[in-house]
Image: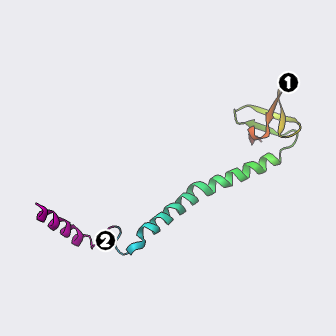
Amino acid sequence: MLYATGIAYAASEGASGGQGGVPGLGNYSFIILMVLTVAIFYFLLIRPQKKREKDRVGMISSLKQGDKVVTAGGMYGIIDSFKEGDIVVLKISGNTKVEFNKSAIQSKVS
């Protein structure tokens, strides 16, 4: 029984070239595949997210009185004034005014 297992193992080693993994890459195949995986994640997920966040921070810093905006909760309003810190006062309708944190502003509406 032990003899048959040894023959099967030797046959499988001979069929795959003696090494596991992708033929031609040698011992560095795992490292190369990990670097490629990290590069794909960076260019498809991390980099675009950083760009969107940078654009959003720029939009928030350029807000001024009279801009029409949408909050993260979906509420539309016009910026009435700014208070100390990061507080923005939005005019919703008529004389209704609501205070929001600047980070709650999702986007400007044209």
Name the residue type under label 1. Answer: Gly
Q: Quadrant of the N terminus?
A: bottom left
In the rendered view, tell whether residue 107 sits above or below residue 58.
above
Distance (Cα) linking label 2 and label 1: 75 Å
Residue at image position (79%, 46%) is: 60
Residue annotated with mark 1: 94
Report the front residue among 101 and 65.
101
Mark 2: give few (<14), some (14-19) or many (20+) Cα within 10 Å.
Answer: few
Residue placed at 42% from the left, 66% from the top?
A: 30
Q: Is residue 49 left or right of residue 31?
A: right
Q: Is residue 15 above or below residue 38?
A: below
Question: Which portion, as a residue range, is magenta?
Answer: 1-20
* Residue 51 placement (x, y as % from top left): 68, 55
Image-based side of 82 in relation to 109, left or right:
right
Q: Earlier in the sequence, mark 2 or mark 1?
A: 2
Q: Secondary structure at mark 1?
A: loop
Residue bearing mark 2: 19
x and y percent of residue 75 in the render?
Answer: 73, 31
Q: Height in image: 24 above or below 5?
A: below
